[in-house]
Image (cartoon, rainbow, N blue to C red):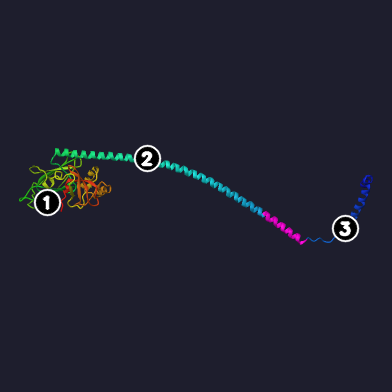
Amino acid sequence: MSILWRCSHHPRAADCSTRKTSLKGEVDGFDEAVATPSKPLHTPAWLLYFGFLTAAAILWGILATWKLQDRTAQMDEALRRVDAAEKAAKVAIAEAEAIKSQAIKDVEIIRREAETLKREAETLKREAETLRQQAEATRVREEEKVLKLHPNFRKLVPGEISVRESYLESFAIENGVVHVKLKNNSGSPITPVFSIAFFDKDGAQTDHVDFTWLITTIDPGQTSSDEKPIRPNLARPVYYTLSFKGGARLFAADNAQPAEPTLVVGDQVVLQDQGNRRVLLATSDWAWDEMLDAENANSADLIARLIRQGKVIAPKSGTVCVIVKNGSFSKLVLIKEGSFAGQEGWIQNELVKPFKRN
């Protein structure tokens, strides 16, 4: 009613009336359409196919998006790892460079220290050689001094000592016992009466043994033996003297002839030790007493140890040498042949014989 009223009073009431008639007709038509049953609607196949494709496309897009996101995440992770590896590599390179630099510094320090030690070692070697020469000079002077005071002194040597004086053939010291070998080279029976005195390196007497046969005799051409214990009172015996009945006598010519007057520095000699295939030489002054102790003790173990330590060498008996230095009781010789050629060593004068050319 209000609409009609408004339209009737509106300046364009005629148009409104016309529209009213048209609207009424549409309403009537709608009522008729509603009152008349409509036919069922059918969706076209192409529309269904298009919808299916659309859904598939959407699904594929979702899956592709997920895959892309996952791949992107993997690439990001790979990039992070690469970045971390690069950083770690840079740190490792920096540490390696630092270690290398420190190693170079350490090597240089060690090199300088090694050079210092080498110089110190050379200095010590020169000082040791000087001390060795001084010790050798002192030893020679002491021996010469003792010989001047006691011209009948003789140096003890290892093993059996050949005497061949009067009826005394030889003697040896073994395990604190003096063993003597006697032989009567005369045409009548003899009653041995003699003594052996032992002295230390300073010429002080350490012991004295007497061999007195008051009843028993030795017939001409016969041999015999005897023994006496020895107990040094002060120190290890180094020298000895012999006294026979009727006063002190020097040694026989075989032993009393010193090598010094006939053999000089530069002479060729032969090393000889009766009954032994090898001769022992001390490689230094310090090893001399150790070698004599081992020989006097008749200890193969001590001798083998000295050889392993390089303090003693053992060339074959008969080896040709050259005299380098003469001492009162020993000589320094240079070996000229065999496995020890070129080495030097100290040896007792008694074991050095002149070299005779064939």
Q: At which x and y percent is residue 307?
A: 26, 48
Q: Secondary structure at mark 1?
A: strand
* Foreground tag (2 vs 1): 2
The mark total stands at: 3
Question: Crowding at label 3, few (<14), some or many (≥20) Cα neighbours within 10 Å?
Answer: few
Location of residue 43 (image quadrant): bottom right
- Asked if the magenta segment contains residue 37, the reply would be no
* Foreground tag (2 vs 3): 2
Location of residue 289 (image quadrant): top left
Q: Earlier in the sequence, mark 2 or mark 3?
A: 3
Q: Earlier in the sequence, mark 1 or mark 3?
A: 3
Query: Visible in this render: residue 62?
Result: yes
Q: Earlier in the sequence, mark 2 or mark 1?
A: 2
Residue 33: mark in rendering: 3
Q: Are marks 2 and 3 in contact (CB under 8 Å)?
A: no
Q: In the rendered image, which residue does mark 2 sit on?
A: 113
Which three-letter amino acid code belongs to the residue tagged 3? Answer: Ala
Numbered range of the magenta stretch: 44-62
Which three-letter amino acid code belongs to the residue tagged 1? Answer: Ser
Residue 153: mark in rendering: none
Q: Main secondary structure of the magenta part?
A: helix
Q: CA distance from mark 1 to mark 3?
A: 170 Å
Q: At which x and y percent is residue 42?
A: 80, 61
- Asked if the magenta segment contains residue 55, the reply would be yes
Left or right position of 26 against 250: right
Q: Is residue 148 above or below residue 302?
A: above
Q: Residue at x 25, y 39 (%)?
A: 130
Q: In the rendered image, which residue does mark 1 sit on?
A: 224
Q: Residue at x 68, y 54 (%)?
A: 61
Of 155 and 139, nearer the camera is 139
